[in-house]
Image: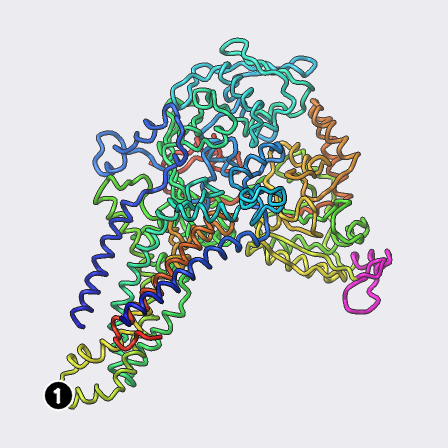
Amino acid sequence: MKTNLWKLVAVLVVLTLVLAGLAGCAPSSTPTEIPTEPPEAEPTEEAPPEEEPTEEAPPEAEPVTLHIGLTYIWDTANPTFGWYNYGLRNLLYDTLIEWGDIDTFEPNLAESWDVSDDGLVWTFKIREGVTFHDGTPCTAEEIAWSLNWTIENEVETFSFYLTNFEEVVALDPTTLQVTLSEPVGNMETALLLFTWILPPSVWEGMTYDEIMEFEDIAAATGTGPYKLVEWVEGEYLILEANENYWRGAPAIDRVIYHEYATDDVMIQALLAGDIDVIDAVPSTGVQSLEGAENVEVLIMDSLFIDELILNSHENGTQPASLNDPTVRLAMEYAFDRDQIITVGYLGYGDPATTVLPTSMGDWHNSDIQPIPFNPTEGNRILDEAGYVDSDNDGIREDLDGNPMEYRLYATDSAANARILEVISDGLAQIGISAPPTVMDEDSLIGLYPDFDFDLIYWGWGLDPDPDFAMLIFTCDQREEGGWNDSGYCDEEFDAMYLEQAVTVDREARRQLMWQMQAKLFEDRPYFVSTYYNNIQAYRSDRFTGFGMGCGDILWKWCFLEGQPVE
Amino acid sequence: MERRDYLVRKLFFAFTTLVVVAVFNFLLFRILPGDPVRLIIHSPRMTREAQERIRATFGLDKPVWFDGERFQEGDILGAFDSQFTAYVRNLLRGDLGVSFATRQDVSELLAERAWRTVVLVLGGDVIAIFLGMTIGLIAAWRRGTPLDTGILLFGLFSWALPTFFLGIILLILARGHLPTGGMVTAGLKPEAGLLYWADVGEHLILPTITMGIVYTGEYILIMRSGVMEVLAEDYILTAKAKGLSTFRTLRDHALKNAMLPMVTMIALTFGYTVGGAIQVETVFSWPGIGRLMYEAVQKRDYPVLQGSFLLLAVSVVLANLLADLLYSVLDPRVKAE
């Protein structure tokens, strides 16, 4: 028996070694899961091997590599249905125009542009000498092709920015002409951010089904400052600088994204130097990072908002009392924004009033005064309106005699659980019962399109142009798959929305936006709770110079300003 | 003869269990709330046709069990064209479907992830077995002394220690010396040979130690109680009376008998930990099957969930079977039911 025991042990040891070796040999996932015929995918994939092993003694300068830590890299390389990590995608592709500041624009692929008097014909002067990562040229012809292709195939991620486009044509290699069906108030912004120019060399000739299945690295081909070299799902993604980028080769040669399963570990990784940048620092990690000398923590204004959604659909399952504007007003007096920010965001955010955050500059209606946290006033309003607590159980009854109990939901993050408690406690102080329930995001989405809820705490990452934030409240968006999550529908509001969409005069449009915000503030489909910060951190002893104007140091040109510390 | 009957009976039960698991597996994910197609379809403007196309690709347009309508029309075979029959048919072919989230073949995905978890678990388990057995043995031999009490407390402590917490502590301690996460340095490929394996090994150190410490506690306790029981037996007294040295007594008599519960424990632990290394995989961002399952649950990735649950069930059933067989080999008295 003893020999058998030692044999068992010996076998186990050998097995371990063998398995460790085999784990190394086991196939690692590559992006090319679905067989396709991409023109030049292979050369880009095979390009880097010389660089990896030669860390010690390279003949030329070592490539400058920046490591980024995040909890989820992205869903797919395909830009037509990829909804995650727009910052990364923005490094791969270019658009015609780039954002400068709140309402200034900078030329990107379009050097200059102007519009006809009737606002229907836009002419863009296209930059010369630009090429895609695969070497094919990017002239007005290719751009026209790309925009038309986007519209024809209804590319779900960004074709809706181009809804008024009637015709896109290249008059010559450096002139692009866009004809609209109606003048558009936010034309420049529509061609910004996400209307990426894609190469016909990759996408031409594909059927709709082929497009929807194309997951090859070549899908990341664009004209942007970085090219996609490799993506191992769930682990890392490698970008390499585009030496031929029209703005000049980036100072950082390689960018590697590392996927971490939890964000707490990223804090340690940054301190250890395994990564140089944390994309989204959890609020709980800020203090430990601020204490470190070689780490710079950036707490920036963002376009993120969080809100409490009050079901406003006339066919929703909410009790009638929730539809009463008086009740809503009283509830807002019981909504403690300061406490929510302290508890849920550790102070990294500002109390909100309207749907458009202050970071949007003068789009934000600064005339609107916030409703302070004042349960006494809330109680007074409800008493006057006839909602009394007849059986003295602490919960008021509505005009039909039913107790005022509302379902309160949110996705299950640690912060949300605590925020819901604050909301629930506040409502309890005015005699409304709202026991908190957290659930996973999919279940929350499952409540639509029946609008089967009373209150939901959720949030948005808004576009810099206010059009999108307002689109959320239009009647059309209530249909299945739409953006309208409150069920709000108002004729007057819809009319204002349609008007601003075709208003070219900036000041006139701004006034409309202010009116719309005021209307929403009165009707209260949302209590917007927080304009919260975007927090990032990086190793200041290794990199410096990132542009601060984007609210995100990984954003395109702000990122390009970064350089290694010498 | 008895041995063979035993074997056949055990195999039969294992097989039946697996069939039940396969059916239950299918059912389970159909009962969960939430429509997985909604996760794939994000766009408000995706046309009806496109939505239907996606449903068809994933077979979600067919009825779940049975198509009553077609049956009534006389189309008997067609009536069975359901998600369930598709599931069974594919299962028999080894086709576990395609992931909703990444569109990767599920069997491939599981194969590559499972390996990584097995390596992680195996490493930790080997450490734990060695340490656990040795320390447990010492504790039992020195029962009643402060050393024994100390070991007992240590065993309880390390077994009760939350894996996640331990992992983070080790990570902080080793910060700067060992990698903070992942399986391999970005860009390094198996073609690099020894360099690659050494790199994977470096990434394996902390997670393996974490797993090891957590399991050691468990094994210490089992070994200790097993040996203590055996040491109380008469034949040990006889051995001592005969003048056998401590070492020989332990080795030739105590150990063999104490190994029985240990062996069972080891076999069972292997089975469970294929999916159970979730905590360690999360702390160290190890791309194994535990993490895969956790993410699949969040995303309602039915095919991946079905596949990994099936894998987990298979490994538990097989491990149980193995434990039973080992037990019957080691202890000749165990054969009849």
Q: Position of residue A121 (x, y in %)?
A: 64, 14
Point 18% across, 77% down: residue: B251
Q: Quadrant of residue A389?
A: bottom right
Q: Give the main secondary structure of the magenta stretch.
A: loop
Chain containing the residue with disc 1: B
How many discs mark residues in the rendered view?
1
Q: Amino acid at mark 1?
A: Gly
Q: Is residue A353 left or right of residue B240?
A: right
Quadrant of the image for the N terminus of chain B?
bottom left
Point 55% across, 14% down: residue: A176
Q: Nearer the viewer, residue A468 or B246?
A: B246
Q: Quadrant of residue A218?
A: top left
Q: Which residue is tagged 1?
A: B243
Q: Is residue A285 above or below residue A462?
A: below
Quadrant of the image for the C terminus of chain B?
bottom left
Point 54% across, 37% down: residue: B54
The residue stretch that appears in magenta: A377-402
Q: Is residue A554 left or right of residue B150?
A: right
Q: Is residue A366 magenta?
A: no
